[in-house]
Amino acid sequence: MKLARYVKFREEKFGGVLFETRSEKVFTLNPTATAVVREIQAGSEARDIPARLKARYKDEGDAIEREAQAFIAELRQKGLVED
Amino acid sequence: MPIPASTPAATGSGDLGAPLYIAWQVTNECNLACLHCIEESGPGKAFPDELDDEQTFAVLEQAMDLEVPYLSFSGGEPMVHRRFFDMAQYVCGRNGQLKVETNGHYLGPENCARLKEIGVKAVQVSLDGATRDTFNRMRVRGNFDTAVQGVKNLHAAGVPIEINYSPTSFNAHEIGTAVDLAFELGAYSFYTGRTMYTGNAVKTWHRMAPSEEQYGAYFETLHRKSEEYRGRMRVHFHEMGLLEELRYRLHHPAALLIVLPNGLVKLINALPFVCGDLRRQTLAEIWGRFQSAWQDPRVARFVDDLATDPRKTATLHQWIYL
């Protein structure tokens, strides 16, 4: 999975932004979502990302994992990523 | 986790480390002399102090270093700039996304192939008329057939196409046909809004300005066309009046910088205020004071004055330095 052709990503102090330049839509990202996009850019497999973030942030519950899964689903649904 | 979405124009600039969009008028020179041109561009109208090559590429380098994701080149006519293709190549070569806003008169097959090879995000062509008669009347020295052929050449080369349309009293009725034409020519987006009373339009307003009745029918058609082409071509239009938009902007400055051919940076195209000079300041420095510049009381006063005197937009080219 990678960012779709017309999607640009930039990190910000609050997290990050995704900019879909065809539709000219901007999506503001919180730190978890930003971490997901970083993983996507690094070439991680989508199915591995939630667990990787859970481990990285030493999350003993499943909040980060669920948040990351939901975010990846939304990225797909909005066409912001492609396989 | 729903992702908050907006547009670059609606995205507040306050928390961002850099602009999301730079709209750069790369030259004021133009081969045409359009009745409505807000920049008063035309043959021989290049500013005497336009950025030189070194300054131009220094600004591009800064924009790319700051990871500004999206730039547009307009003018005047950007394709008459002597380094146009080098500039486009630089932006796209550094992974920036570039839109070129052109009158479509330099879109021969060879140039379209170059634009495709460079990888521009889109080329926006102004087609202010669905017929030869209205287009040629509006775009003095312009030729409808040349512009349409230019769009066809873009399509043949595989360059994404946007069409822009400025309404007047004599072309507003053609809007439906113009949207259809844009789709037939292969455009993926169509943009329009209200024509602004500034630049050349100040001199031609009496024979060019659409009436409110015409605007009513215009936007009604656009609503219909927007539905008709849903999922096939985006029909995007700004129905909001200038005053409403500026009042909104006072509190929500867009994450957008307008760069003039001489390196001056404006708060927004529809105001005369200049918040920086790229010949003397870096892009980062100008961005750093962009928010506070919007808070200057002269800006709010100008917007307030527009409510009682809408023709104040005639003075947009008398720059006020903040």
Image (cartoon, coloured by chain):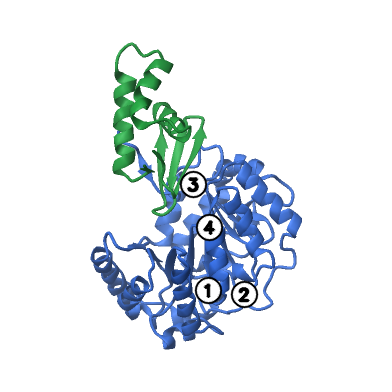
Chain colours: A green, B blue
Cα separation, mark 1 vs mark 3, equals 29 Å
Q: Which mark is residue B253?
A: 3
The answer to which of B201 and B300 lies nearer the viewer is B201
The answer to whether residue A21 is visible is yes
- The residue sitting at 44% across, 66% down in the picture is B161
Q: Vertically, is B248 above or below B269?
A: above
From the image, tell me which residue sits under label 1: B103
The quadrant of the image that shows the N terminus of chain B is: top left
Tell me, yes or no, whether the two marked residues, 4 and 2, touch with CB atoms within 8 Å.
no
Per the image, label 4 sits on a secondary structure element best described as: loop
**x and y percentages locating residue B140 in the rendered image:** 54, 84
**Contact flag, marks 4 and 3 (Cβ < 8 Å):** no
Q: Amino acid at mark 1?
A: Asn
Front residue of A3 and B140 = A3
Which-is-in-front pick, marks 1 and 4? 4
| Image-quadrant location for residue A34 | top left
Left/right of residue B192 with respect to residue B213 in the rendered view: right
